[in-house]
Amino acid sequence: MTITIAIKDIVFKCKTDEQIFYERLTKTTGLTKITLDGEVIYLFVACEYQHSAIEELTALCDMWHGTYAVMPNIV
């Protein structure tokens, strides 16, 4: 089972900055999938790694002035 986390409002200063962000994002603990919908990045993270992933995403979003939210699971 996974949780979904939406990231938005990321500020990139240049193309290299954007590449570094995505490289770090792909190393998120428990990451199973990333999708992009317009300006929103959706991460799918294995539930057992939820707390570690959120700590890592908090640091990333702080560095790139973005925000994130854990999305409700719809069954």
Image (cartoon, helix red, strand yellow):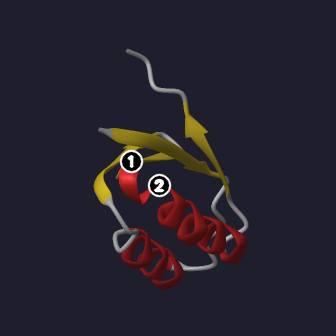
* Pointers 2 and 1 in contact (C-beta within 8 Å): yes
Q: Residue at x 35, y 74 (%)?
A: 27
**Side of 33 where 63 appears, left or right:** right
Residue at the spot of label 1: 47
Q: Residue at x 40, y 69 (%)?
A: 28
Q: What is the count of numbered marks?
A: 2
**Residue 66 picture location, percent across and down:** 68, 60
Residue 61 - label: none
**Residue 17 picture location, percent across and down:** 53, 82
Which of 9/46 is in front? 46
- Image quarter of the C terminus: top left
Q: Residue at x 37, y 77 (%)?
A: 23
**Residue 51 picture location, percent across and down:** 53, 60
Residue at the spot of label 2: 50
Residue furthest out toward the top: 75
Q: Secondary structure at mark 2?
A: helix
Q: Secondary structure at mark 1?
A: helix
What type is the residue that disc 1 sits on? Cys
Q: From this view, report whether residue 65 is shown above or below residue 43.
A: below
Which of 64/60 is in front? 60
Q: From this view, report whether residue 32 is shown above or below residue 28.
A: above
What is the crowding at mark 2: few (fewer than 14 residues within 10 Å), some, or many (at least 20)?
A: many
Which of 19/50 is in front? 50
**Residue 1 picture location, percent across and down:** 29, 38
Q: Residue at x 54, y 44 (%)?
A: 6
